[in-house]
Image: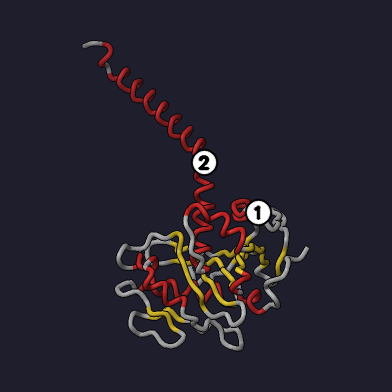
């Protein structure tokens, strides 16, 4: 048998190919990281503009965002604005979200995790303000059927009625739970549904399909678990364990504290 066809040489060639391919893939991942980060940041801005009701075209996204949207860092345990944490600083133009997410201390939910966010909640969150329309854009997330849904809800700063919702990340079933992306379903959230009562209790409900009342969002047909997941995440993040203290605080359209 030719030595080139030996088992030893076969494994040697396979190993070399694996190493070369690994180096190429790793190099590509490192080389494209900055572009991937930029695309992720752009996609985040698209979703914030969308949930704010601001029409955009791709070339105008950065300009529209900087001209209309302001970011603020909120301490969820007090409901107050802050400018810096142990790990990150923030100003009017930039904020290192990834650094904060990777390093900040978390609050243990002690087994009370109705939204399914992993048993821990961050102590700080970034909210977005749309001063012209007096809107608050709040990040929300929670467990659906197959995935964690991540998105934003927009509410009026005056009466906390809904102004919009969007999910930028999920893995729900196309045509069923995936209908959280359907513009017709999302349009319900633009109809000023009341979210809180006079005592700050969440009264907005995402119900089963066809059963919507004055403060209800008509759920997704054939997607009961995803519908329940959206209901739970909304109740959690608008409630006292999420942004409740922030929503009860004073004027939201002021400069962050020093």
Left or right for 213, reference 53: left
Front position in the image: 71 or 66: 66
Q: Position of residue 34 (x, y in %)?
A: 54, 42
Q: Give the quadrant of residue 112.
A: bottom right
Left or right for 182, reference 169: left
Assign a secondary structure to mark 1.
loop
Q: Which residue is mark 1?
A: 94
Front position in the image: 151 or 85: 151
Assign a secondary structure to mark 2.
helix
Q: Which residue is mark 2?
A: 33
Q: Position of residue 7 (x, y in %)?
A: 28, 20
Distance in Å between CA atoms under marks 1 and 2: 19 Å
Q: Residue furthest right?
A: 258
In the drawing, what numbered circle is on residue 158? Answer: none
Residue at 41%, 67% in the rendered image? 144
Residue at 71%, 54% in the rendered image? 89
Quadrant for the N terminus, please.
top left
Residue at 44%, 59% in the rendered image? 169
Q: Nearer the viewer, mark 1 or mark 2?
A: 1
Q: Residues within 10 Å of mark 2 (few under 14, many from 20)?
A: few
Q: Is residue 59 above or below residue 211?
A: above
């Amino acid at each position: 048998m030719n030595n080139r066809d030996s088992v030893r040489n076969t494994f040697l060639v396979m190993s070399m190919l694996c190493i070369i391919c690994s180096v190429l893939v790793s190099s590509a991942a490192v080389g494209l990281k900055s572009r991937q980060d930029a695309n992720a940041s752009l996609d985040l801005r698209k979703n914030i503009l969308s949930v704010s009701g601001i029409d955009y075209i791709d070339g105008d996204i950065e300009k529209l965002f900087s001209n209309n949207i302001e970011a603020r860092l909120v301490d969820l345990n007090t409901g107050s604005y802050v400018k810096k944490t142990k790990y990150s600083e923030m100003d009017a133009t930039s904020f290192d979200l990834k650094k904060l997410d990777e390093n900040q201390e978390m609050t243990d939910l002690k087994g009370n995790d109705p939204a399914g966010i992993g048993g821990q909640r961050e102590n700080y969150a970034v909210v977005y303000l749309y001063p012209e329309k007096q809107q608050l854009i709040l990040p929300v997330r929670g467990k659906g059927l197959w995935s964690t849904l991540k998105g934003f809800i927009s509410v009026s700063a005056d009466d906390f009625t809904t102004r919009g919702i969007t999910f930028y990340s999920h893995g729900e079933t196309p045509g069923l739970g995936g209908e959280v992306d359907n513009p017709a379903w999302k349009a319900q959230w633009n109809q000023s549904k009341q979210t809180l009562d006079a005592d700050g209790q969440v009264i907005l409900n995402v119900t089963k399909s066809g059963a919507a009342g004055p403060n209800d969002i008509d759920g997704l047909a054939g997607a009961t678990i995803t519908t329940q997941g959206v209901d739970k995440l909304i109740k959690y993040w608008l409630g006292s364990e999420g942004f409740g203290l922030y929503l009860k605080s004073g004027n939201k359209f002021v400069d962050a504290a020093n």
